[in-house]
Amino acid sequence: MNIDTTINNLPILTWNWLKINNVPFSYSAAVNAADSTVAGTLPEGVSYKADAGSDTGAYAGIATGVGKNTDSVFTEAKVRTALITAKKNVHVSAPVLISFDQADRSSTASAQIIRAEEGSSVTVIISYTSPESASGFQAVRTLCSAGKNAYIHLVKVQLLGSSFTQIDDTGTFCEEGGRVEVTQIILGGKETYAGVAAALPSYQSSFKSDTAYLCMGEQKLDMNYIVRHTGRKTDCKMSVKGTLSGNAVKTYRGSIDFKSGCAGATGNEQEETLLLSPTVVNKSIPLILCDEEDVAGEHGATIGRLGEDTLFYMQSRGISKQSAEQIMARAKVAGTAALIPDETVVTKINNYLDKAFAHE
């Protein structure tokens, strides 16, 4: 398989010299299909098909954040798309767990569709792990479709080895009153390309995302979040929090697109970035596009080093500068991890952070 393309494209171009319209991506190696197998017992009220087969076509129109330029990864690997369905008017109490434990030098692709039928609710947690120093490639595509007054909580936790490259591509669609929430924690890997696109075409549908990351050493993280409002009184909220240290490079594109006809729609995006090294590279572009008058959009960003007042307060209580920085970095992840309704996954996150900071 040979790929040489651009991914994570902004919905509208800005100045080329900013080098933020998209990100070049190249890969040349065989990629194998990996099934999205549910770990443990399937919760009551949920059906699972390892291969959605012809049903996949019903969700083909859902746009994703990374974009169609990576379609060949999934088609050439002959990926079987799993279908997870929460049945009508059923509120699934236990989360559906999907775990990918990647071997060293593995190269895989997988895909899932999560469907919440009318009046239902479901949480799906997808985690990615590998040996600490493992290398390899992983591509994952997840589509979420929330029916009328249905709710999907998608959790993605990336704890891959230090030499992994990952593409994590997500697309969501909501019918009237439908809600999708995406909680994403990105800690591992050498290069991570994460994208989320949300379509809100129906009355009072909504989308919410909470993302936390830690980029250390030579890590590279490139994110692209897009919410397209076309329905009336739709709402979105996006929050991204993270820390950069060493020579890490991070790009965040956050776009709220108010289309004509989405009267009464609201959108808010906030970013917090803690910079712990003068050699990190941080690029952020919060973007609001507007084709409708009766809307309310807000965005804000806090980017900088640990404040002198905060640092002095901690040092006056016997906390070193390095420990203070670690405390603040952990806090950004912990706030998002608290949204994950599975203690085992949260413990894995904390253990990963312990090891990461021990190596500093």
Image (cartoon, helix red, strand yellow):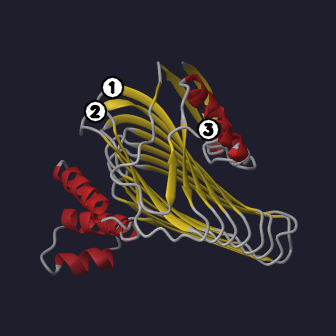
Residues packed near mark 2 inside 10 Å, few (<14), some (14 to 19) or many (20 plus): some
**Earlier sequence position, callout 1 versus callout 2:** 1
- Residue 317 sits in which quadrant? bottom left
Q: Which residue type carries mark 2?
A: Ala
Say which residue label 1 marks.
Answer: 105
**Earlier sequence position, callout 3 versus callout 1:** 3
Asked whether 123 or 103 is in front, the reply is 123
Q: CA distance from mark 3 to mark 1?
A: 23 Å
Q: Which residue type carries mark 1?
A: Arg
**Earlier sequence position, callout 3 versus callout 2:** 3
Residue 72 coordinates in the image, percent (x, y): 62, 27
- Residue 144 sits in which quadrant? bottom right
Q: Is residue 133 among what the camera can see?
A: yes
Please, what secondary structure does the residue beneath circle 1 have?
A: loop
Residue 259 coordinates in the image, percent (x, y): 82, 63
Say which residue label 3 marks.
Answer: 7
Image point (76%, 76%), residue name: 233
Asked whether 177 or 310 is in front, the reply is 177
User: Does the residue at mark 1 contact the one at mark 2 (Cβ under 8 Å)?
Assistant: yes
Residues packed near mark 1 inside 10 Å, few (<14), some (14 to 19) or many (20 plus): few
Q: How many marks?
A: 3
Asked whether 212 or 45 is in front, the reply is 45
Image point (51%, 71%), residue name: 91
Asked whether 81 or 252 is in front, the reply is 81
Instruction: Give the mark toward the camera: 3 or 1.
Output: 1
Which of the labelled discs sits on residue 290, or is there none?
none
Say which residue label 2 marks.
Answer: 134
Q: Is residue 239 among what the camera can see?
A: no
Please, what secondary structure does the residue beneath circle 3 have?
A: strand
Is residue 151 shown left or right of residue 40?
A: right
Residue 98 coordinates in the image, percent (x, y): 40, 49
Residue 122 coordinates in the image, percent (x, y): 51, 64
